[in-house]
Image: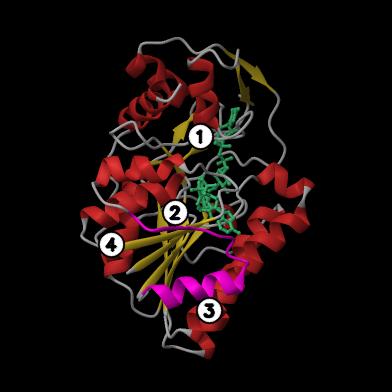
Amino acid sequence: MILVTGGLGYIGSHTIVELIKNNYEVVVVDNLSNSKREVIDKLKKITGKDIPVYINDLCDKKALRQIFQDNIIDSVIHFAGFKAVGESVEKPLMYYRNNIDSTLTLLEVMEEFNCFNIIFSSSATVYGSPKSLPIKEDFPLSTTNPYGSTKLFIEQILKDLYTSNNKFNITILRYFNPIGADESGLIGEDPRGIPNNLMPYIVKVATGELEILSVFGDDYDTVDGTGVRDYIHVTDLARGHVLSLKNQNGLRIYNLGTGHGTSVLELVNTFEKVNNIKINKKIVPRRPGDIAECFASCDKAFKELGFKAEKTIEDMCRDAYNYVKNNE
Ligand code: NAD
Ligand code: UFG
């Protein structure tokens, strides 16, 4: 049985779909701090399976022990955590408490129950401002905000844990920019309030909920002056977790991206074309803390896991909008 923490959230829910497609049994723990109960029914519709879900906080050790008592857990995929960069600058203690305390509690309970297999959701944010591109896993690590620091600290905790007890199989996955949604249109990304990230913002302009997209800077040294990122379809990302699970052995670290960069304007243009809709936009100054360009070297994940992203930017734009249209 695979324990998926944060399994009702955006990436966790898509990973559950892929796990079930691959005949894994899944149990979920989520405290609904950034997700909705209705995802449980939607997962049932997509997979045809009743998935056991515990509505608990991962920081609650007693509750977590109960989950390990009730189920024979072979591996954990650990998505739970807070993820908004800006909010982490305003509320650093809340971010450190939630992301680090939950992980420590989880790891302690795993050791108690002799469960030694974990996959952790890290982020390309741990590369800080990369000196060259594409970004490889052995590049120097640094962060510029408390959210990123939680990822970096947890990576270090996992490395130290592995040194102390090499029964552990630990896979650290550094995601680039996940966007898009399941083909069914039933699950997807549903940020509360005004989105910080580009694709959710574009989608809300498309639905008319927001008036105009601010493009943060057009004077970067990139193809058209706007920021470049490595967008990966969330379903591809989810497949990366299944491949990681099948290849757990010691301490491993992989980038999960496509290896291709797309600019803000390229993404907006593709969105307009695929969905046949106009996105109002204006150029505004750069967002503090943003880097110009970021894309992954995907060689390691390909060689060692056989992972290759398959979906296109067109797929990502179509599926992201389809989800929101379905759920308006
Ligand atoms: P999400 O917010 O949609 O999902 C996280 C889930 O964890 C939510 O359902 C939330 O309710 C739950 N959760 C949070 N704290 C919890 C706690 N203490 N106990 C129990 N449940 C808790 O986020 P996501 O986009 O699915 O991201 C999943 C993971 O991937 C996060 O760790 C995130 O930092 C990381 N990540 C995300 C991105 C991205 O762009 N989405 C990029 C890189 C890394
Ligand atoms: N952008 C805009 N307008 C917006 C939002 C974003 O022009 O309204 C631009 C940004 O300047 C950037 C690009 O769109 O050039 C992508 O921005 P996102 O906020 O979507 O993504 P980031 O790469 O900045 O950050 C994301 C996550 C972080 C994570 C990082 C690396 O939000 O949590 O990817 O994985 F750390």
The correct choice, above or below, for 247 with respect to 56 in the image is below
Measure the alpha-carbon separation of dots 1 and 2: 14 Å
24, 274: nearer the viewer:
24
Question: From which residue to which does the magenta span run?
Answer: 51-71
Identify the residue shown where x is 31% and y is 30%: 315
- The first of marks 2 and 3 along the sequence is 2
Q: Are marks 1 and 2 in contact (CB under 8 Å)?
A: no
User: Which quarter of the rendering shows the N terminus?
Assistant: bottom left
Q: Amino acid at mark 1?
A: Asp
Instruction: Establish whether ligand 1 lies closer than 8 Å to the Cβ of label 2.
Output: yes
Secondary structure category for the residue under label 1:
loop
Q: Amino acid at mark 3?
A: Val
Q: Are marks 2 and 3 in contact (CB under 8 Å)?
A: no
Q: Are marks 4 and 1 in contact (CB under 8 Å)?
A: no
Marking on residue 7: 2
Disc number lying in front (2 or 4):
2
* Residue under numbered circle 3: 109
Measure the alpha-carbon separation of dots 4 and 1: 26 Å
Q: Are marks 4 and 3 in contact (CB under 8 Å)?
A: no
- The first of marks 1 and 2 along the sequence is 2
* Residue under numbered circle 1: 190
Q: Position of residue 84 (x, y in %)?
A: 64, 45
207, 277: nearer the viewer:
207
Q: Position of residue 3 (x, y in %)?
A: 40, 66
* Residue under numbered circle 4: 243
91 displayed left or right of 130: right
